[in-house]
Image (cartoon, rainbow, N blue to C red):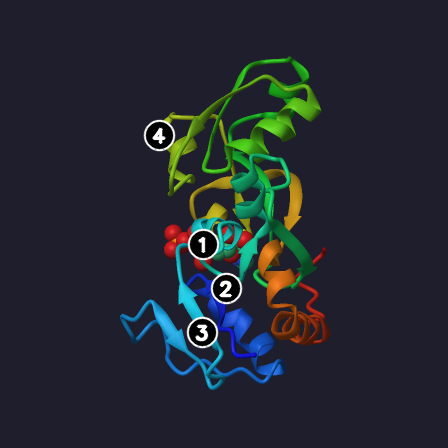
Amino acid sequence: MNETITLALSKGRIFEETLPLLRAAGIEVGEDPEKSRKLILPTNRPDVRVVLVRATDVPTYVQYGGADLGVAGLDVLLEHAGGDAATGLYQPLDLRIACCRMSVAVRADFDYAAAVRQGSRIRVATKYTHIARQHFADKGVHVDLIKLYGSMELAPLTGLADAIVDLVSTGSTLRANNLVEVEQIMPISSRLVVNQAALKLKRAALRPLIDAFAGAIPDTSACST
Ligand code: ATP
Ligand code: MG
């Protein structure tokens, strides 16, 4: 059989950190996405290609069959499905790459614990509205969520919000903006996602790939999942 396997990746850390997993499966990507303008990258395997999409579009491509499999952050997956399991999207592996955490951060002079204790309404700016809504509902904290698409750190500094919900890895971006991490919501890592129909139809080609990925998952201390 000679079916093409399409893998959806986003440029940047996910692409970089997926390369060693691909290598373990005997797959070398022919071109560097930072240097090429191509959106479809061939590999050394004539039956395997990589498509470059926005990180938030990876689950969409895989769910609807634009790609057979892909790599997406847990943050992206939870926001994609709005908290529910997306139909047709199989998540067989935590790849333990692109590790970080989802956290609540505030300006250093904002007493978050007191605001929570007093039952105040807290204004929270975030790109991750589903994760944030669920988190504060679980805690019984009243929040007004403000949806942003980037530069969340700016929101508490300008008075747009009291707090942000954002990804944190080293914390240096928060520190550079006088923000402090006051609560960790969940550890985040990237997951392999596979189109369920493709897994049935192209099982002979996909299964060995998934198994090779599974055998090459890094044992990084940066990842707490
Ligand atoms: P862009 O930064 O180009 O706007 P993006 O934020 O969607 O796009 P990336 O920054 O490459 O894309 O992030 C991709 C994934 O990597 C995120 O969904 C998340 O799971 C993870 N990630 C994000 N920031 C960090 C970080 N600082 N450290 C480790 N992993 C991270
Ligand atoms: Mg980013």
Q: Earlier in the sequence, mark 3 or mark 1?
A: 3
CA neighbours of label 4 inside 10 A, class few (<14), some (14 to 19), many (20+):
few
Which residue is label 3 attached to? 49
Q: Of circles 3 and 1, which is in front?
A: 3
Q: Amino acid at mark 2?
A: Ile
Which residue is label 1 attached to? 55
Q: Answer with the quarter of the image where residue 146 lies.
A: top left
Q: Amino acid at mark 1?
A: Ala
Which residue is label 2 attached to? 14
Q: Of circles 3 and 4, which is in front?
A: 3
| Badge number at residue 158 | 4
Q: Are marks 4 and 1 in contact (CB under 8 Å)?
A: no
Q: Earlier in the sequence, mark 3 or mark 2?
A: 2
Give SS at disc 4: helix
For the point 42% across and 39% down, the residue is 152
Q: Nearer the viewer, residue 55 or 157?
A: 55
Q: Is mark 4 within 8 Å of ligand 1?
A: no
Q: Amino acid at mark 3?
A: Arg
